[in-house]
Amino acid sequence: MSTTYGLIGLGNVGSDLVASAVAAGLDVHAFDIDAGARERAAGAGAHVHGTATEVAAVADTLVLSLPNADVVDAVLLEQGLLHLVRPGEICVDMSTNLPARSLALVAAGAERGVAVLDAPVSYGPEGLVSFVGGPAADVARVRPWLDAVTVRAFHMGPHGHGQYVKLVQNMLNGVIMGVIGEALGFAEHAGVDLDRLPEALAWTGARSEMLTNVLPRMARREYGTSGTMALHSKDMGYLLRTAAEVGARAPFTAALREVFEDVLAAGDPRWTQTALVEWYLSDGVAAQGPVTGTAGER
């Protein structure tokens, strides 16, 4: 008998999950509080429901793709969806969550005989990648879903380790973007031709895929409208909280988080991460005040 998958959360990532799962022939039932997101999921071929409770009631495997830890807790615990998952079944949290909160969900699920896996995702050069934490046997049970919606799903170890690795990835991406923005700000203050800079650096030892992709968009001040800068700042906050819990130092992340927050406070909440260059430019957002224009879709 085929598995019925229930997906709660149809935002930037969730909409891609639906499209990939349906294309792979999986039976997907979905819900989001946004009517437009539900309509898009229905158009992709999912069975769309009017409430999250309806999805959880029919799903053999419940999957979450939600914006933050508080929303995950609200859906699973406060709204009681975890209690609707049948004993012996699995809940897969593909949201970026606090590791400590993920472990608390594991314990809550165990009380009902429900396995909870953390499987946060990230976009890489080839597509969506997932980092999975939990027992190997449980990971194997959800492989059909993971293989359908990601190009690679890495089993990183026990519960919580998927979230740890996702935070490492966000730390690296954020800090590297911050350095690129700082370098670009220096170049502009020095009067360097920003149109020529990306090609020149591409021939040096500083060349990297992120430099190649990010530097031109920053130079053109193309910031997109998907709102991922706010999500990234949230994730860096999760990293700093977790670093304090495990006794790790994260000074670069701490400094860059302040830059992110300054730009978010004075700029456009819909911007993507490339907008952090505003902080460094000669007419940067932190010095100038609110900037409202957006350009370029991520």
Image: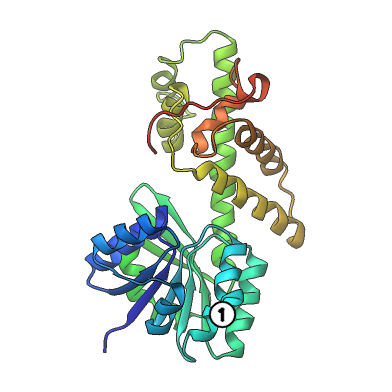
Q: Tell me where residue 242 appears, x and y as whole percent.
A: 70, 59
Q: Which image quarter is the C terminus in?
A: top left
Q: Give the left or right position of residue 85, taking residue 246 as reference.
A: left
Q: Secondary structure at mark 1?
A: loop
Q: Give the left or right position of residue 119, taking residue 98 as reference.
A: left
Residue at figure coordinates x 53%, y 57% from the top left: 67
Q: Give the left or right position of residue 158, taking residue 295 as reference.
A: right
Residue at figure coordinates x 64%, y 19% from the top left: 288
Q: Tell me where residue 126 appears, x and y as whole percent.
A: 33, 50
Q: Which image quarter is the N terminus in?
A: bottom left
Q: What is the number of callouts on the image?
A: 1
Most foreground residue, 271 or 249: 271
Q: Quadrant of residue 196?
A: top left
Residue 112 versus residue 127 in the image, above or below: below
Which residue of the protein is positioned furthest toward the top in this rendering?
191
Q: Tell me where residue 203 appears, x and y as whole percent.
A: 40, 23
Residue 123 versus residue 96 in the image, above or below: above
Most foreground residue, 187 or 66: 66
Look at the image and tell me whether residue 151 can be seen: no
Q: What is the image's colouring?
A: rainbow
Crowding at dot 1, Cα within 10 Å, few <14 / some 14-19 / many 20+, comes out as some
Name the residue that disc number 1 marks: 80
Q: Give the left or right position of residue 162, taking residue 253 as reference.
A: left
Look at the image and tell me whether residue 64 can be seen: yes
Q: Amino acid under label 1?
A: Gly
Residue at figure coordinates x 70%, y 37% from the top left: 255
Q: Tell me where residue 239 appears, x and y as whole percent.
A: 65, 53
Residue at figure coordinates x 49%, y 39% from the top left: 270
